[in-house]
Image (cartoon, helix red, strand yellow):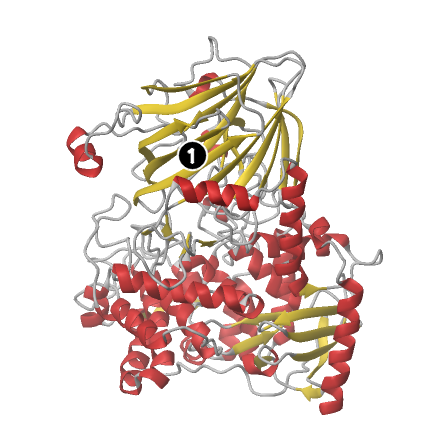
């Protein structure tokens, strides 16, 4: 064993020395997930951000666009493939659905400010694009129909823009403080501009100010962003403006409630303007021989001075390509090089692009705001844009812990600090405000997964467990949201008034009864895992509560020729089975029976107690038959829109509840079928193309599912179990736990036909289980050696993965 470990270390060092200079960014297609779903297109609509950014950066610099057809509009990332450019702004989310957030601190290059242009009406100066956009890691370029070309890049809290105007044209830059990403469809969760200010500094090159916005998908409270912009060359003219919003669409909302304005902000100065005004400045250069205008902008949640400091420290050259190269260097060093695979000419380039693009997208969010918390002073790190824990707890955060342990420890500490100061950890959080909660209190799952996998460092786990207890025991106040007025959607568990006394979430008193029952059960299992060390007296209580999903199991109800399924139950204890079809969930939205998946799908989503689930479904053969059925074409009865368009099976990899389902053959020791099903899903729905993900990428959640698939592994959340799949590369070097190496090799690999496992060695020893424990390879590193072939063999003869929550009520 010692010799074997030394040999692996030597091989790893040699491999690393060969590949250290590889620019992995060349294998990143930053446009995967930027399109669709369009009529006639099978899938897409990843809603991803396109522009300049660094890993977990605060600034995400990119264009904002308007689509004429609102059904095609995927505005959360700002970018749409054919939309008209409305601005270049400093902040964006990535991969998220629902009403937009951010798109703030904006500029727009103009070649005229005369009629028909009206700087108070965005629709009079937005621009179509001509030709093809250029987009790569750290860099974006487009050309507007006015003839202006736009180039940009981004750093951690800042960005740089270069505008090249047609020879002889006027050169103006509009800074619209009141700009943000609107929701083209309107509704109760639109953003709103609440006020701001812009000041021109002596010399004319620098402008500073702030803007305050509220609302957006998470129904957020007002947040303020300070900015500091600078031009390379002082303009010949600069003029601030304010005026009544004249945009005729319900795109831009400006707050005019005077009592509210007075309460929030007091008497604003003339320079700030009333809150129903648009505010900004126009900068003009009259030198006709010079065609290029360059600008760099810093942002801060603390002050304009700090925004200026970020700008000066992070954007050190007026050459956009210098900032772009710095971003590439950071991505290579801190992200892409964590997983190294062969990149020679014999490799499948599509697979390389899928791997490194997926790594890119899962590192765009959340945002590391350490040192930028405007709400309280704390020695703890600060993170924002958890959008949302519901999406990323299933397999993304485990990958953070493995690949980015320092960042991840910082995230965990930030989640706990939010509880410490605001009372609850977030499920969703953006703009320094908790919201929304789609199901359970899933920060609990994130903390438990980190704890059982050994994360300690400077995390105060006593406080962490207290934060989890708050979620488990204290019902949050009702926020009376239009999204769901029945209970809080801001934070915590809004249906504890059912869960604690009834042992389930009832369908007559609460919404999302089936999905929240399933999620609350896993949340309580998460508490029990941490309590084993920190509060042993709580273990039995929360283990019992983790089994309460069984209280919604209708043992004698038959659907689609399968008996036993999760079903709605009234508060009086009776099942509500009249006209019940578990293959449907209404709109699968906030006020429906289950969220983003049908009860038939949620009936497979019990990762902590697969043994009981298999028994409830009638044993291993019946379980396998039901699992087979959900992969059959034309079995889906539910229209799930963007996150399910053209997926005509009940199994829907476009939505997170189904992420682990195709691996569940492991629990009946048929690992080859898990490989078959997951490969089928990956090859069908993930592509090196603008429509290349099956729905919203959800802050990189879908991308991280694909990464695990390509590694030949898959984690079971809140446990130390890692399921063994089949790798897509013959040689994988992973940096794990900071500075350890996991080497994964595969002989006999043929991604077209020869990818079934024939045998496995782990750390030099023959392996007969279809799963690993985290400590086997992810703490000190190690090796996994696959022998692959075209035959589906029963190589795994050892015990099946554990069901640590096994308990029959």
Q: Classify the position of the C terminus by image quarter.
A: bottom left
Q: Nearer the viewer, residue 716 or 657?
A: 716
The answer to which image quadrant residue 509 occupies is: bottom left
Q: Pinpoint residue 116: horizontal percent, then vertical percent.
A: 47, 9
Q: Is residue 286 left or right of residue 332?
A: left
Q: Residue reaching furthest front?
A: 202
The answer to which image quadrant residue 766 occupies is: bottom right
Label 1 CA crowd tier, 10 Å (few <14, some 14–19, many 20+): many
Q: Is residue 502 above or below residue 203?
A: below
Q: Pinpoint residue 542: horizontal percent, then vertical percent.
A: 30, 79
Q: Nearer the viewer, residue 368 or 567?
A: 368
Which residue is at 65% across, 20% downward? 291
The answer to which image quadrant residue 475 occupies is: bottom left
Residue 328 seen anywhere in this rendered image of the structure: yes
Q: Classify the position of the N terminus by image quarter.
A: bottom right
Q: Pinpoint residue 59: horizontal percent, then vertical percent.
A: 50, 44
Residue 563 seen anywhere in this rendered image of the structure: no
Q: Nearer the viewer, residue 591 or 471?
A: 471
Q: Is residue 770 above or below residue 684?
A: below
Q: Is residue 701 left or right of residue 616?
A: right
Q: Pinpoint residue 539: horizontal percent, then vertical percent.
A: 31, 84
Q: Is residue 484 left or right of residue 155?
A: left
- For label 1, the residue is 181
Looking at the rendered structure, the secondary structure element under dot 1 is loop
State how many labels appear.
Answer: 1
Q: Residue reaching furthest top?
A: 115
Which residue is at 37% across, 43% downward? 303
Q: Nearer the viewer, residue 612 or 14?
A: 14
Q: Is residue 287 left or right of residue 121?
A: right
């Amino acid at each position: 064993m010692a010799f074997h470990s030394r040999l692996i270390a030597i091989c790893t060092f040699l491999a690393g020395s060969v590949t250290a200079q590889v620019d992995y960014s060349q294998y990143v297609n930053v446009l995967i997930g930027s399109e669709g779903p369009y009529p006639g297109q099978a899938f897409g609509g990843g809603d991803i951000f396109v522009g300049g950014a660094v890993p977990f950066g605060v600034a995400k610099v990119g264009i904002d666009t308007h689509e004429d057809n609102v059904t095609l509009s995927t505005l959360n990332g700002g970018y749409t493939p054919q939309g008209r450019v409305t601005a270049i702004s400093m902040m964006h989310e990535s991969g998220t659905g629902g009403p937009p957030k951010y798109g703030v601190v904006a500029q727009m290059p103009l070649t005229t400010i005369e009629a028909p242009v009206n700087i108070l009406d965005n629709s009079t100066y937005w621009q179509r694009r001509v030709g093809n956009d250029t987009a790569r890691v750290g860099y974006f370029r487009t050309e507007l129909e006015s003839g202006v070309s736009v180039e940009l890049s981004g750093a951690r809290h800042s960005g740089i823009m270069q505008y090249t105007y047609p020879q002889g044209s006027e050169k103006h830059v509009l800074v619209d403080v009141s700009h943000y990403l609107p929701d083209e469809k309107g509704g109760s969760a639109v953003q709103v501009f609440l006020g701001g200010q812009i000041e021109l500094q002596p010399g004319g090159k620098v402008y500073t100010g702030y803007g305050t916005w509220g609302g957006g998908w998470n129904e957020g409270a007002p947040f303020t962003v300070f900015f500091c912009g600078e031009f390379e060359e002082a303009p010949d003219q600069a003029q601030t403006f304010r005026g009544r919003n004249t945009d005729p669409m319900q795109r831009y909302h400006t707050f005019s409630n005077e009592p509210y304005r007075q309460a929030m902000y007091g008497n604003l100065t003339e320079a700030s303007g009333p809150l129903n005004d648009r505010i900004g400045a126009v900068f003009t250069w009259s030198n006709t021989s010079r065609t290029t205008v360059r600008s760099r902008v810093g942002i801060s949640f603390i002050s304009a001075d700090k925004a200026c400091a970020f700008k000066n420290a992070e954007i050190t050259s007026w050459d956009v390509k210098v900032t772009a190269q710095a971003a590439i260097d950071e991505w290579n060093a801190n992200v892409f090089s964590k997983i190294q695979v062969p990149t020679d000419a014999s490799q499948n380039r599509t697979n390389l692009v899928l791997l490194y693009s997926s790594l890119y997208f899962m590192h765009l969010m959340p945002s590391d705001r350490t040192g930028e918390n405007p709400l309280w002073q704390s020695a703890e790190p600060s993170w924002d844009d958890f959008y949302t824990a519901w999406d990323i707890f299933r397999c993304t955060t485990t990958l953070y812990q493995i690949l980015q342990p320092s960042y991840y420890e910082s995230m965990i500490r930030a989640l706990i600090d939010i509880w410490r100061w605001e009372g609850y950890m977030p499920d969703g959080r953006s703009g320094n405000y908790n919201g929304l909660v789609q199901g359970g209190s899933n920060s609990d799952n994130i903390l438990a997964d980190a704890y059982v996998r050994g994360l300690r460092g400077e995390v105060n786990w006593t406080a962490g467990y207290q934060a989890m207890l708050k979620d488990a025991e204290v019902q949050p106040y009702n926020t009376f949201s239009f999204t769901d007025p029945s209970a809080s959607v801001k934070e915590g568990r809004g249906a504890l008034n059912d869960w604690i006394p009834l042992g389930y979430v009832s369908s007559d008193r609460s919404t999302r009864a089936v999905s929240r029952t399933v999620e609350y059960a896993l949340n309580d299992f998460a508490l029990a895992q941490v309590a084993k060390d920190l509060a042993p007296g709580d273990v039995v209580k929360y283990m019992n509560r983790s089994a309460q999903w069984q209280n919604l199991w209708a043992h004698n109800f038959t659907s689609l020729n399968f008996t036993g399924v999760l079903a709605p139950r009234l508060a009086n204890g009776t099942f509500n089975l009249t006209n019940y079809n578990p293959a449907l969930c209404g709109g699968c939205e906030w006020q429906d029976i289950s969220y983003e998946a049908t009860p038939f799908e949620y009936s497979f989503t019990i990762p902590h107690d697969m043994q009981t689930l298999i028994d409830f479904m009638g044993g291993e053969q019946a379980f396998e038959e039901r699992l087979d059925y959900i992969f059959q074409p034309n079995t889906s009865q539910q229209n799930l829109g963007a996150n399910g368009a053209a997926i005509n099976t009940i199994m829907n990899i476009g939505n997170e509840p189904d992420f682990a389902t195709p691996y569940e053959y492991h629990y009946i020791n048929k690992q080859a079928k898990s490989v078959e099903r997951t490969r089928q899903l990956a090859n069908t729905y993930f592509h090196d193309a603008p429509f290349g993900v099956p729905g919203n990428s959800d802050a990189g959640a879908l991308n991280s599912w694909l990464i695990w698939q390509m590694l030949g592994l898959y984690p079971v959340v809140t446990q130390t179990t890692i399921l063994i799949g089949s790798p897509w590369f013959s040689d994988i070097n992973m940096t794990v736990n900071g500075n350890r190496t996991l080497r994964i090799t595969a002989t006999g690999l043929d991604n077209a036909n020869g990818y079934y496992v024939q045998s496995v060695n782990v750390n030099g020893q023959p392996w007969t289980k279809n799963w690993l424990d985290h400590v086997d390879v992810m703490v000190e590193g190690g090796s996994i050696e696959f022998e692959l072939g075209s035959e589906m063999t029963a190589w795994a003869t050892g015990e099946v993965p554990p069901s640590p929550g096994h308990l029959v009520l």
